[in-house]
Amino acid sequence: MTSALLTGGTYRGLAEQKLSPAEERFERARRTVGFVLAPLVTIVFLFVPTTLDSGQQTLAAVLLGVVVLWVCEPVPIPIGGLIGVAAIVVLGVLPADDVLEPFGSSTVFVFIGAFILAQAMLRHGLARRFAFFILAIPGVGRSTWRVIAALGFVTCVLSAFISNTATVAMLLPTAVGLLTVIAELIRGRTPEGERFDPLRLRVGIALMLVLAYGASVGGLLTPIGSPPNLIGRGLIEEATGERISFLQWTTMALPACVAMFVILVVLLILLNRPEIRKLTGVEEYVAGERAKLGRFSPAERNTLIAFTITVVLWVTPGIVALVAGNDSRAYELISDRLDEGIVAVLGAALLFVLPTNWAQRRFTLTWSEAARIDWGTVLLFGSGIIFGSLLSSTGLAERVGNGLAGALGIGSGLALTIFAVLLAILVSETTSNTASAAVVVPIVIPIALAAGVDPFTPALAATFAASFGFMLPVSTPQNAIVYGSGAVPITKMIRSGAAFDVIGAILIMLLIPLMVAAVGFS
């Protein structure tokens, strides 16, 4: 934060800062390795003598190549999945119609509908208005600790319904503005002649990291909060036959999210103790920003209506189940009619029929605006579900599970849950969280089945842990965004991220089995 940044002049340049030269060299090397290793691994495994039948061996060879593409990213991650899907058909594992059938999964439409709703919230400023509403609560702007906690809370809540990356990108200017005010206050109290570097303020590190890490924590709260959630849920439902409703997921996730958020705020403040405790000027800054937003617009009103209706319909089957029971005729009727994918599509459709200016036939969202959603994640989810389905239908999952269960000596649900969490966190530190879920959950489920363990809990724990990855700028897009602000040294991110990885892993191992049992899945 140079003086130019403190006046907002160079915010965009800092926010788009690239990785360091050493990190860029690592990224280039990783991608180069992927170009060579992916086809090499596939070809070698195709011809290695194994006890697998022809179809299973071909599927395994292609899947190994795809995993290399996902980890090394020589091509965009969604394209890596599509290459694998095409290779399966070309190599004759199954006909195209059979391979592509899972792409019609209801969850694909949950992605599409939820992304369009989120696009409207970002496009019309509804999410930003909510952020300043929380920051304007009396007393929040008078303490650095409260500002850090409030910014983290806003990030968590928004990330439960909006892309983690989009949430952080949207709130970064707000965080920079808050830091600008705090930095000027600290500068005024710095003795003459003492070096003042606004890019190395501890309060800045805490503000930026609560933004990045808070998004990952909040993303766990709902099935639509993060792509790994929907991928993991789809694979779990397919493997176990258990249907996880929107309300059931949120009920299981809530205790872990609350505990992780509290620990996150405390941990960041302890590791990056702010230079100043009491604040002045922040409340005035927030009031000024709220004034700029103006009155509630028709577009914001319509977006809120569509979003509220969608969420209410998503949780209705869960409420009916609580009242009448999962085996009741009422629950069966409601859950079939209010399928989450269909509800998401209907909610998104409202944005195209609720007018902002009827006389000119202007509506809340245009198709060109809606088409900017993250189609790559939709494609990655589809290809991940395809591979999960093929692993089961070809019998490869059972063969792999039997082999790994024997080799690892895993014979209990607790041991498998610990293994699943640690593996997911390790993979998520080196590749995208979405790819982490697509890689780890299909590994955990067959191991559980082979060991005679219910795969529900370990697979769910792996899904949650896949959203971790707090140590490096390349671990998640939100880490990269806040690192690009220039306010977070790499050493501070590694220290804070490593501590939160460990604590978060312990919380998942302890709380998820308890909540799974409490909700009634085991």
Image (cartoon, rainbow, N blue to C red):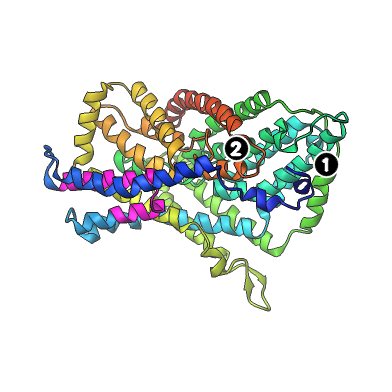
- Which of the labelled discs sits on residue 283, or is there none? 1
Q: Quadrant of the C terminus?
A: top left
Q: Is residue 355 visible?
A: yes
Q: Quadrant of residue 352?
A: bottom right
- Which of the labelled discs sits on residue 458, or is there none? none
Q: Earlier in the sequence, mark 2 or mark 1?
A: 2
Secondary structure under badge 1? helix
Q: Position of residue 368 (x, y in %)?
A: 55, 69
Is 33 left or right of 515, judged from the image as shown? Answer: left
Q: Position of residue 347 (x, y in %)?
A: 53, 59
Out of 342 and 271, give the one closest to the viewer.
271
Residue type highlighted by circle 1: Glu
- Mark 2: few, some, or many residues within 10 Å (few <14, many ≥20)? many
Q: Quadrant of residue 356?
A: bottom right
Question: Label 2 to label 1, Cα distance in Å?
Answer: 22 Å
Q: Is residue 70 magenta?
A: yes
Q: Residue at x 82, y 33 (%)?
A: 186
Where is mark 2, residue-wise? 214
Majority secondary structure of magenta residues: helix
Is 423 left or right of 263, judged from the image as shown? Answer: left
Q: Residue at x 23, y 24 (%)?
A: 407
Secondary structure under badge 2? helix
In this rendering, the answer to whether 518 lies above or below 281 is: above
Out of 522 and 508, give the one closest to the viewer.
508
Residue type highlighted by circle 2: Gly
Magenta residues, start to end? 55-84
Q: Is residue 274 magenta?
A: no
Q: Are marks 2 and 1 in contact (CB under 8 Å)?
A: no
Q: Quadrant of the N terminus?
A: top right
- Mark 1: few, some, or many residues within 10 Å (few <14, many ≥20)? many
